[in-house]
């Protein structure tokens, strides 16, 4: 029986999502979003993915957007539901992922009255504003169309990020006119003139020790081909931010990769006569907390004008889309007499090899584990690394990424988000293998989402490195205080747990067994979890600086 004959606010929301070419919405159904779910069901073109928690739903939408370049959309309930998603929204904000979060809100007549309407938060709008790029509350139902269209555009506008819109419960089923909002714009010449000062071309052509630092902006603008042309022309050292992995194939002989905070790269930068940074945020953890030397001759390309002198001084900041700017730059350089220094090229290749050899010397058997992963997994595998020692010591560096959008990590540093992100990436890229590196402590944060992978037929591969607790925190406590607390965890039998959820699973205790287990997972084409017994394979001896260790002890700073 069809109960819907009139056009409502919920219908207008779905109409705008369809117009924005939204194909998937992640979320959890609630009494405070039922009309929106029903409107999506009736419209019929949007896939609805049901997560087991709002935090996981946000992570899935975030990863979907990162892996596809499309808008991520998540739908949650009011108050507690919106709050449950807030932590994951801070990750989305940190990564700058374009995401629309639609949530309910208390009946408009009770917002701010302290009457404790069901699911009410004291100040939901303020809570959401703190976790997002922006947050808005719908106040006039008939204006839902420009309201949601503005939110979508804002999420997609540089600097991109998550935007939350709160829709009061009494508005969602309200009947409104099905009127049309048509944006009439003057058609402009699609050929955009890029004005690059002549002396920039001269400085690039004259440089004998150039360095390119490629960030996520290269990926976001689809500028990988233009970047490779520039690299072929000027023969620089290429370092990438962690977000920029895959901006250039990491098997390129001049690609040092995600090794910025190393002695070899520090030396290259000290002696460099030119740095071209492209869409790079220069995060603290990748720059020795902004102490890496940067040459005065620093040309920065970024679509966000606020990147100018944000973390490092720039001689020139070219504000524009990386793809268009690099096309013009390559055009200018085509008319220059470029003579790369062969000795410098050899030095770059030596640095590329040196950073990898140094890392391998510190991680024991896990260098071989990384090699096995690269050998057995397809070239276009999407790798997701959770916040765990294997993820941020070797997984994010030694597993080469060959294509943009094939590497996802937790930009904000929060543990446990990897599993739902792997699911979101797999839904967005169904024809690729998606592999998650996770630790046992973080994995349990969102382990309930395993059943979402089964329900959504998302054949992810989980590599779970089980060391019985929070390994990195064990190290910091013992190094700083000579004792530890609250870091040793009682875990379930992960293989039994995985099988109970519908995964295929096995435990491995050596490098050879890991190779067999991963081969089985690849062959399976079903959700698969390989549990690595870290105690048996080898505990990674992590070491941080004495200065950082001392920061946990009483001090006067």
Image (spheres, helix red, strand yellow):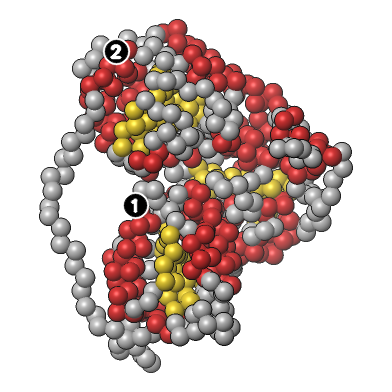
Provide the secondary structure element on which disc 2 rests: loop
Comparing 427 with 16, the one in front is 16
Front: mark 2 or 1: 1
Front residue of this view, candidates 455 and 31: 31
Please tell me how crowded label 1 is: few (under 14), some (14-19), or many (20+) other residues with Cα within 10 Å: few
In this rendering, the answer to whether 2 lies above or below 411 is: below
Picture coordinates of residue 92, whole percent (x, y): 50, 53
Judge the density around disc 2: few (<14), some (14-19), many (≥20) Cα neighbours within 10 Å. some
- In which quadrant of the rendered image does the C terminus lie? top right
Q: Quadrant of residue 2?
A: bottom left
* Image quadrant occupied by the N terminus: bottom left
Residue at image point 59% right, 30% down = 288
Which residue shows up at 34% across the image and 68% down it? 148
Would you say the residues marked 2 and 1 are in contact, meaning their CB atoms lie under 8 Å apart? no
Q: CA distance from mark 2 to mark 1?
A: 36 Å
**Residue at the image point whose x is 76% and y is 34% from the top:** 550
Residue 218 visible from this viewpoint: no
At which x and y percent is residue 214? 43, 32
**Left or right of residue 14: residue 526:** right
Using the image, determine if residue 110 lies above or below residue 356.
below
Pointer 1: what residue?
157
Quarter of the image holding residue 210? top left
Residue beneath the point at 42% across and 33% down:
309
Image coords of residue 36 (percent x, y): 41, 77
Q: Which mark is residue 338?
A: 2
In the rendered image, the residue lying farthest to the front is 556
């Amino acid at each position: 029986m069809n109960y819907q004959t009139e056009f409502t606010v919920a219908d207008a929301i779905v109409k705008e999502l369809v117009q924005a070419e939204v194909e998937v919405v992640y979320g959890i159904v609630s009494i405070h979003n039922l009309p929106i779910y029903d409107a999506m069901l009736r419209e019929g073109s949007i896939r609805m993915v049901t997560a087991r928690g709002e935090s996981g739903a946000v992570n899935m939408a975030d990863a979907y957007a990162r892996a596809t370049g499309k808008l991520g959309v998540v739908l949650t309930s009011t108050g507690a539901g919106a709050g449950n998603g807030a932590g994951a929204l801070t990750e989305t904000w940190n990564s700058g992922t374009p995401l629309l979060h639609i949530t309910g809100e208390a009946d408009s007549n009770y917002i701010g009255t302290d009457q404790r309407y069901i699911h009410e938060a004291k100040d939901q709008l303020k809570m959401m504003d703190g976790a997002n790029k922006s947050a808005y509350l719908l106040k006039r139902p008939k204006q839902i169309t420009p309201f949601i269209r503005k939110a979508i555009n804002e999420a997609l506008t540089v600097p991109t990020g998550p935007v939350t819109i709160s829709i009061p419960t009494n508005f969602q089923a309200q009947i409104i006119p099905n009127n049309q909002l048509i944006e009439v714009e003057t058609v402009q010449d699609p050929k955009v003139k890029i004005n690059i000062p002549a002396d920039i071309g001269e400085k690039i052509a004259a440089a004998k020790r150039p360095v390119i630092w490629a960030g996520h902006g290269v990926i976001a603008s689809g500028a990988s081909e233009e970047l490779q042309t520039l690299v072929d022309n000027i023969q620089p050292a290429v370092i990438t931010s962690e977000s920029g992995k895959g901006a250039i194939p990491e098997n390129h002989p001049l690609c040092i990769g995600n090794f910025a905070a190393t002695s070899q790269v520090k030396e290259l930068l000290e002696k460099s006569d030119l740095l071209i940074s492209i869409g790079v945020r220069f995060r603290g953890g990748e720059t020795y907390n902004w102490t890496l030397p940067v040459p005065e001759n620093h040309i920065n390309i970024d679509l966000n004008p606020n990147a100018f002198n944000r973390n490092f001084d720039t001689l020139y900041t070219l504000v524009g889309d990386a793809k268009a700017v690099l096309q013009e730059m390559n055009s200018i350089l085509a008319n220059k007499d470029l003579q790369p220094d062969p000795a410098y090229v050899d030095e770059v290749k030596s640095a590329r090899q040196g950073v990898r050899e140094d890392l391998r010397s510190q991680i024991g058997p896990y260098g071989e584990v990384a090699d096995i992963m690269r050998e057995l997994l397809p070239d276009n595998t999407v790798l997701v690394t959770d916040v765990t020692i294997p993820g941020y010591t070797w997984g994010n560096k030694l597993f080469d990424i060959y294509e943009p959008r094939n590497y996802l990590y937790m930009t904000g540093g929060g543990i446990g988000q990897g599993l739902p992100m792997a699911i979101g990436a797999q839904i967005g890229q169904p024809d690729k293998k998606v592999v998650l590196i996770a630790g046992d402590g973080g994995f349990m944060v969102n382990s309930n989402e395993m059943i979402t992978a089964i329900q959504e037929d998302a054949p992810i591969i989980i590599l779970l490195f089980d060391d019985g607790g929070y390994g990195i925190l064990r190290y910091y406590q013992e190094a700083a205080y000579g004792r530890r607390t609250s870091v040793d965890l009682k875990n379930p039998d992960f293989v039994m747990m995985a099988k109970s959820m519908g995964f295929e699973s096995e435990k491995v205790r050596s490098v050879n067994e890991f190779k067999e287990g991963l081969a089985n997972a690849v062959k399976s084409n079903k959700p698969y979890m390989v549990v690595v017994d870290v105690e048996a394979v080898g505990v990674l001896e992590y070491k941080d600086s004495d200065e950082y260790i001392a920061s946990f002890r009483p001090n006067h700073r």
